[in-house]
Amino acid sequence: MQRVSLKRMRSEESPYTLQTKMHVNEKIVDSHDANKMKEIHAKTTKLLFQAARSVSNNNIQPNRNKKTPVSSMVVLFGNGQIETAKGAEDLEDEFLWVRRKAKCCDRETYVQSDCTNCQKPLCEECGFSCTECGQFICNSCVTVFGSCDADHPICEKCSLFA
């Protein structure tokens, strides 16, 4: 009778090689199929030439879903007063003129945004517009970066060049 070792064999002594798991997805399988790769190449070149023709014929469609930032539409004065920004009279954003509860002070406000400097939420009651660039800034940033008054609020970026 042959004696069987109770110990497990070392991998070098085993007649079997190590097995590893390998995830094979559809993309890997298709990359080895010549017909499938020809289809993908044909579709890609077709789309490229369509786009090139569109550009050469000036048929580029403007992006109509592009949202205008709120800071370019209104000017905040810090006391709840809102004024339409210069050049924004023709912009109509019906969502802007809906009162919602503000995150910063729990008031019903029209404008809700974040401070450019500290990303703190603000509304028209507790936010200002930078006099240089028009970005919204909060009360605390007006005192830190501005001239310590609400008459001439300046954001951090504009205070570097002032």
Image (spheres, rainbow, N blue to C red):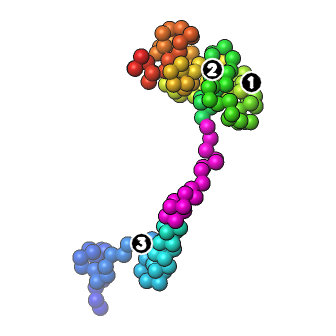
Q: Is residue 65 magenta?
A: yes
Residue 55 image offset from top left, x and y in percent: 51, 59
Q: Which residues are magenta?
A: 52-68
Instruction: Decide: few, some or many residues near mark 2? Use Cα within 10 Å; few <14, some 14-19, many ≥20.
Output: many
The extreme left residue here reads 12
Instruction: Give the numbered dot on residue 108.
Output: 1
Q: Which residue is mark 2?
A: 76
Residue 134 image offset from top left, x and y in percent: 55, 24
Query: Amino acid type of disc 3?
Result: Met
| Cβ atoms at labels 3 and 2 below 8 Å apart | no
Query: Amino acid type of disc 1?
Result: Glu
Could you tell whether 7 is left or right of 74 in the image? left
Q: Which residue is mark 3?
A: 22
Mark 1: secondary structure: strand
Q: Earlier in the sequence, mark 3 or mark 2?
A: 3
- The residue lying at 59 percent from left, 29 percent from top is 71
